[in-house]
Image: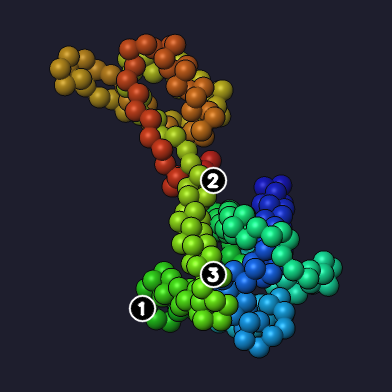
Amino acid sequence: MRENLKEYGMLTIVTIVLILTDYLILFPNHFTFGGVIGVAVLLSGVLGGSPNTYAFIMNAVLFVIGFKVLGKEFGIRSVYVSVLFATGLGAVQYLIPVHGTISDQPILELVLAVLLAAACSGAIFNLSASTGGTDIIALMLKKYTNIHIGKALMVTDFFVVVLSFVIYGTTVGMFSLVGYIVKALFIDTVIESLNLCKYFTIISTDPKPICSFIHEELNHSATLYRAEGAYSHKEKMVIMTVVGRRQAVKLRNFVRQQDPHAFMMITNSSEIIGKGFRGML
């Protein structure tokens, strides 16, 4: 229960930051990185009016359709984030009136927008949720067609970015293209960084103190299996465990002090699924 509240609190904070990023930076600068927000920016340039209004309408319509079509597949967290994102975008224009860009440095604003948007999107995906929009379209296509969703959305988003050249000119179009590319690359980096763990393979003749340290000090478990040295033919024990980045330093130092002859292999991994780590998604 406490863990769920913590995660929903994190989703709330991250979604609010994403809303403010779109409203204060993307919309005034007409930056377009694809998705529903990108389409809203384009519609604002063609038809006039606020991008917030178009984004709210499109997100609301997609949410209703997605909830009816997908049902439980949509996920309670995605429902929460989608509703918060859509209503937040609709409300923020009345709470914080904006009449221009927040600075006269579009490059700095682009960098800030890309970093915040990618970090927030990565954090939301990492918590098994989404902001709705084109994610809903992707889930519906996945359910009823054999289309490669990732490629389809990438092409669609790229087409939206290309249209920004036509509607807002070369400068804004180039800013949008750079932002689109960097954001796509940075989201994966954020997700991997959030999930990064250290996978230890330790070969030792005295595994008991090491296992005790893992259990008692690091609050993790380990797997043991017997092995034989190819040259010495002596029996040894292999200890396999996964710990967080901070714990990895403690474990490495302990093993080096406890058994200087132990052989260690330490590998980075961002996909550890099981008890104590990520659940089966």
Residue 45 position, x and y percent, is: 63, 82
The residue beneath circle 1 is 146
Image quadrant in which you'd find residue 47: bottom right
Amino acid marked by disc 1: Asn
Here the colouring is: rainbow
Residue 275 position, x and y percent, is: 51, 43
Q: Earlier in the sequence, mark 1 or mark 2?
A: 1
Q: Is residue 136 visible?
A: no
Q: Tag count in the figure?
A: 3
Amino acid marked by disc 2: Leu
Mark number, residue 171: 3
Q: Label 3 crowding class (10 Å Cα cut-off): few <14, some 14-19, many 20+? A: few
Amino acid marked by disc 3: Thr
Left or right of 102, for residue 68: left
> Considering the numbered disc 2 on the image, is that residue within a helix, a strand or a loop?
helix
* In this view, 110 is above or below 29: above
What's the distance in space between the residues labelled 3 and 2, CA to CA? 34 Å
The residue beneath circle 2 is 194
Task: Assess whether mark 2 and mark 1 are in contact (beta carbons under 8 angstroms).
Answer: no
Which residue appears at 41% of the width and 34% of the height? 199
* In this view, 85 is above or below 128: below
> Considering the numbered disc 3 on the image, is that residue within a helix, a strand or a loop?
helix
